[in-house]
DNA sequence: GCCACGGATGAAACTTACTTTCACGAGGCG
DNA sequence: CGCCTCGTGAAAGTAAGTTTCATCCGTGGC
């Protein structure tokens, strides 16, 4: 099963803009200039002719066409009408907050809060829009039938990996997470056909995670990648690719929003797995909740 | 060019489609054929080229252009993108998902994803709305001036605590997180005036966290509570209370959304702290990013 | 009946936009 | 060093959109 053609979301169901942001890093420099213009103001881009857009992006028409093809369009006119549609559907961002914008130097805390929350919420929503339920379903299948599931992640993605592991564990699935690469490699080497390995990496370029996932794949385990970038290295060794949709801004803010998006995906998979055997999962959750009850104070009401 | 249009092209206020159907009777027969096609299926019309549309309307391209002018457009491309936008706007937003709703037993994965994402995004947005910037500011002040900052949390909130610790550490602030209660208690006992202790607990009733926070307070440290419930026990021993706004549903889904909300709050505090000394924080971030660079593959962009 | 007249219309000329081809140059690899 | 690959824009080629203009057809006047 690990040798079947790679399954990933090639359709861009959610938003075209989201789709483009995800592909951004995999584009050539000149195409990136075009992409950034398009993403930052789709409506304006839709109004431009190809020559006009090329000029603004400081490139040639040929590159714009290449960009269209890169993001899966037939040609410029198609991109144009899709952009117009997209821009119309999109509710105007509340106020002056630029989507995916960075925080201005003089910002006060209220602005900071608004900006972060806006970007975080957007990342979550857009991730859900572009998530392919069919791929999720297959991943859920794999986990449900797996002898065991290893979850790998480093740095910030390590928290997410750990969270996933804990969730699976709580509903009685055998799952592991390893904060240490060597231990993870050792574990991966012991995986086999029917097992599942999940690698989480925002950039998709974390060599530690990739390496471990490769090892897992070599042993016959089904491999799942969770990344923000659909064409990053990690996707090349994964049987199933799930992508988040945090807009790339500065590395920092992109990564922050991405982590929330990753958690959302993890939650979806978790609920999907739990839904496969409600009774068992419910029981398991109750038992584990009971286990920590003695660590809770104040019996009753909290809300005022 | 001296030809004056017979219909004074006023700004079409409502929808373009409405506008067109309004002046349909005033159009010439051939133009009416075009108009009817456009009105009956704007999206389809937007997909056609002018030649195509002319053919379907059994007329010439020239007439289509005349039609464009008659309804106040500059030319066909403009009509086309306006139609695309119009058509997109008509599509009803997905479905009225019940806020805070639980996932129905027979739900398929697509529904699960939609529900989770919806609740997650809402929790983040609503948390931001009710967060008090003044309190955040004070917390940021305290952390900025602190000798050191301890972050406590258990279970799922432990991930958030750990994340916060790591973030502060990355920008050069002395911060600690302890997965173990005993160690945490020990650490709290060593805090003093000017230090900060942050306790994270969704329910606000986690005795371990409360206990540690009490200890910290007794030693003179400033105490911060991050919880979903503003009147929970943990708030009684905190100098500063920050609340998340995950709607209470089942414990499970509430906690999932809450965790994202907690992370958002943590991000806000983090950015707030970082903003106090941009140069230093930026430097620290760069240095730490550099430190993991060798663990990334494909230094440039990802190939397609 | 014949002849203007004027609006509607499409064929064809024309212009602009879009697409393809190709050659050059940079950077990587043997 | 030579070979390759890839990104790129100039220019050629094609298709789309626009304008022009002759035709058609009905109308009304002589």
Image: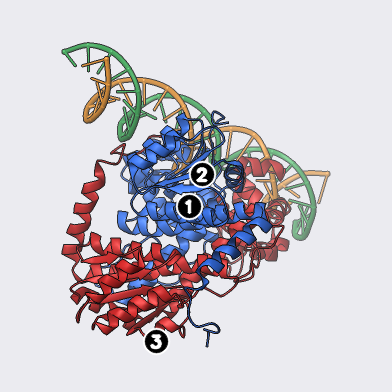
Chain colours: A blue, B red, C orange, D green
Q: Are marks 3 and 1 in contact (CB under 8 Å)?
A: no
Depicted B275 relative to depicted B210: above or below: above
Comparing A166 with B97, the one in front is: A166
Local SS, label 3: helix
Looking at the picture, how far across and down is residue B303, in whole percent? 38, 34
Question: Left of B55 or right of it: where is B255?
Answer: left
Residue named by callout 3: B236
Residue named by callout 2: A149
Depicted A139 relative to depicted A277: above or below: above
Which chain letter goes with mark 2?
A
Q: Where does the C terminus of chain B fall, quadrant-wise?
A: top left
Q: Is residue B71 visible?
A: no
Same chain shared by disc 2 and disc 1: yes
Same chain shared by disc 2 and disc 3: no
- The numbered mark, 2 or 1, whose residue comes first in the sequence reads 2
Q: Which mark is residue A99?
A: none
Local SS, label 2: strand
**What is the quadrant of residue D8 in the picture?**
top left
In space, the residues marked 2 and 3 are separated at their CA atoms by 41 Å
Looking at the picture, how far across and down is residue A253, in whole percent? 34, 59
Residue named by callout 1: A165
- Mark 2: few/some/many CA within 10 Å (<14, 14-19, 20+): many
In space, the residues marked 2 and 1 are separated at their CA atoms by 8 Å
Which chain letter goes with mark 1?
A
């Amino acid at each position: 099963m690990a040798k079947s053609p790679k399954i990933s979301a090639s359709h861009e169901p959610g938003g075209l803009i989201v789709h483009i942001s995800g592909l951004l890093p995999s584009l050539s420099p000149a195409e990136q200039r075009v992409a950034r213009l398009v993403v930052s103001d789709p409506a304006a881009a839709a109004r431009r002719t190809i020559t006009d857009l090329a000029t603004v992006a400081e490139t040639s028409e040929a590159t714009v066409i290449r960009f269209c093809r890169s993001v899966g369009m037939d040609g410029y006119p198609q991109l144009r009408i899709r952009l117009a549609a997209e821009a119309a559907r999109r509710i105007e961002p509340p106020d002056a907050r630029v989507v995916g914008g960075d925080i201005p130097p003089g910002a006060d805390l209220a602005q900071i809060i608004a900006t972060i929350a806006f970007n975080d919420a957007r990342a979550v929503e857009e991730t859900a829009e572009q998530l392919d339920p069919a791929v999720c379903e297959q991943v859920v299948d794999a986990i449900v039938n797996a002898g065991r599931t290893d979850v790998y992640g480093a740095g910030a993605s390590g928290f997410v990996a750990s969270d996933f592991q804990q969730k699976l564990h709580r509903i009685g699935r055998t799952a592991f997470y390893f904060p240490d690469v060597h231990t993870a490699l050792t574990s991966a080497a012991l995986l086999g056909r029917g097992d599942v390995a999940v690698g989480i990496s925002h950039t998709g370029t974390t060599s530690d995670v990739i390496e471990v996932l490769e090892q897992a794949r070599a042993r016959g385990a089904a491999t799942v990648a969770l990344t923000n970038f659909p064409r990053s290295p990690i996707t090349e060794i994964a049987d199933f690719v799930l992508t988040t949709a945090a807009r790339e801004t500065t590395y920092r803010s992109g990564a922050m929003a991405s982590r929330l998006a990753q958690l959302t995906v993890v939650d979806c998979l978790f609920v999907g797995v739990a839904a496969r055997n409600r009774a068992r999962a419910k029981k398991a959750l109750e038992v584990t909740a009971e286990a920590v009850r003695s660590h809770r104070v104040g019996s009753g009401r909290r809300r005022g």
